[in-house]
Amino acid sequence: MQSATTHISAQEIAQMTPEDVAQLAQRLEQDAYANAFEGLQDWHRLRAVAFQRSELVEPYMHLLDLEAFDES
């Protein structure tokens, strides 16, 4: 059984262009997915790019809603 999220390889992320990330972000902003899992898959993909190539995601950080958490 395949999980709802697909593994995103470091090689895939390394090959992503700013245009690829812009298209990904546009899909997330439009939020016109057939089901919630498609949106979640794109969100995970954008998040993976943010961790490995943050410069590509800077204009779209608002879509990730990443906040620092105080664990104390």
Image (spheres, rainbow, N blue to C red):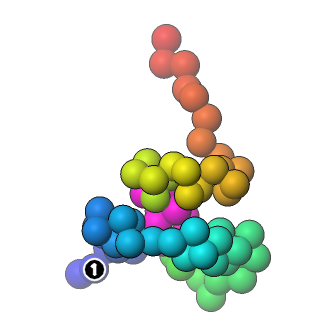
Q: Residue at 64% across / 71% down in the picture?
A: 22
- Tell me the crowding category of disc 1: few under 14, some 14 to 19, or many 20 or more residues within 10 angstroms, Cα based: few
Q: Residue at 55% across / 26% down in the picture?
A: 69
Q: Residue at 72% across / 82% down in the picture?
A: 32
Using the image as rendered, state which of residue 17 and residue 30 is in the foreground.
17
Q: Amino acid at mark 1?
A: Gln
Instruction: Single out the residue that lies furthest toward the top.
Output: 72
Q: Is residue 50 left or right of residue 35?
A: left
Residue 44: image location, x then y, percent: 47, 62
Q: Is residue 51 left or right of residue 26?
A: left
Give the vertical position of 25 relative to 34 (above or below): above
Secondary structure found at label 1:
loop
Residue 3: image location, x then y, percent: 32, 73
Instruction: Single out the residue that lies furthest toward the left.
Output: 1
Residue 63: image location, x then y, percent: 67, 56
Instruction: Single out the residue that lies furthest toward the bottom.
Output: 34
Q: Residue at 57% across / 29% down in the picture?
A: 68
Residue 57: image location, x then y, percent: 59, 56
From the image, give the main secondary structure of the stretch colored magenta: helix
- Let me know if residue 60 appears in the view: yes
Examine the structure image and report whether residue 51 is included in the region drawn in magenta: no
Residues rendered magenta in the picture: 41-48
- Let me know if residue 5 appears in the view: no
Residue located beneath label 1 in the image: 2
